[in-house]
Amino acid sequence: MGSGQISHVARWDLDKTYLRTEFDTLRELVKTALERADEKRSHPGASAVIRELQTGDVEIHVLSGSPEQMRGRIEAKLRLDGIRYASLTLKPNLQNLLRLRFRSIRGQLGYKLPSLLRMRARVQDPAVRETLVGDDAEADAFIYALYGDLIAGRVHADVLLAVMQGDRCHPDEIADAMTAMRRVEPSDAVDRILIHLDRQTPPSDFDLYGARMVPFYNYFQAALILNEDGLLSPDALLRVGTDLVLQHRFDGDALVRSYLDLARRGHVHGQSLDGIEASLDNWPVPDSLRSGRPRPMTTGLDEIHALGRRMDDLRAAAAAAPVRELVKVPDYFSLVMSHNRRRS
């Protein structure tokens, strides 16, 4: 952050957010750990979104629950995908094991929250904005929302202490979080929290966290939100759509449905549609559209132009999108205690 040129950072989880990983059983965990970089699969469109973000003034920071021993393979995978990152933070599970901190091996709150606070404490300019990206497999939504409210001053250190004690975090983790919290310059910096619905959790489950929390099913939806937030240009959005069509068998209807779903849930309101339409006017038009004779899609351009053909539907959906009301700060202590009861 020392150059002063970065105005926005994106903090990105890996497993089930970027990488398509399974670790619900010991066998899956071992398989994931032994995979070569070229065997690891990213979620469709995830790498395209990050590559487009990093062409602007968005700095990428990767924060993952994957163990530190996987650093080499993860770094190789990110290089293969053309991802540049400012930092890569991995979980010190070997240290946890050697110190007999078994809860810390599985726990996320005691690892991710202090890490986020330490990283924010190193940000020199409190005006730097943040976008956080995670998934619904663990506690990313809870951790990100709490982090955003902590650095904004809406939640104070006594709540942080009670929440981490309620989650039975290790005393060292609690001390790390409390120390980092004191070093953070207060700023309402978290603009958006994007949660990938890897486990198909109902989006309404996240309503308690407010309008900045956006559960998404695919990375075209994530790109639409980032476009409306001004972090992706319309051309960048169309390039993400083209990647999904060419590499992952999306079609025009899937792209359109992605927007309609976000509008129905009140996450987009049409601010970006004029820009998308203007970009489509300058986007290459395939011969099949000029002639009116459909033919097998070879470039993905036919599918991208479905957005233009359905622009009236998109505008109507955006106009009818509900306005998401502001919500009060969640009762984080009650939430963490309820989560612990469900786990036990």
Image: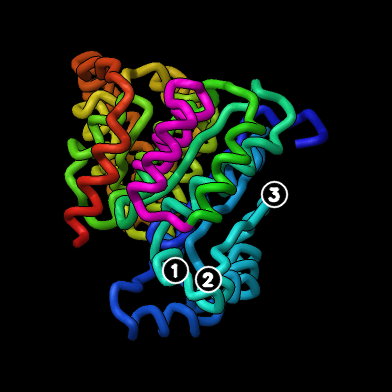
Q: Main secondary structure of the magenta part?
A: helix
Horizontal arrangement in the rendering, residue 143 relative to residue 120 (left or right): left
Which residue, given by chain and number where applicable, does mark 3 sit on?
86
Q: Decide: is 68 above or below 188.
A: below
User: If the image is split into quadrants, where does the N terminus sit?
Assistant: top right
Residue 139, position as x, y percentages in the image: 34, 50
Check the picture and name the quadrant holding the C terminus: bottom left
Q: Nearer the viewer, residue 221 or 301?
A: 221
Q: Which amino acid type corresponds to the residue marked 2 in the rendered image?
A: Asn
What's the amino acid at mark 1? Ile
Contact (CB < 8 A) between labels 2 and 1? Answer: yes
Q: Is residue 44 visible?
A: no
Disc nearer the start of the sequence (3/1) = 3
Q: Which residues are magenta?
A: 142-170
Furthest residue in direction right, as rendered = 3
Question: Residue at position x 48%, y 75% from top?
Answer: 100
Specify the label residue 96 is tagged with: 2
Graded by Cα atoms within 10 Å as few (under 14), some (14 to 19) or many (20 or more), the crowding at tag 1 reads some
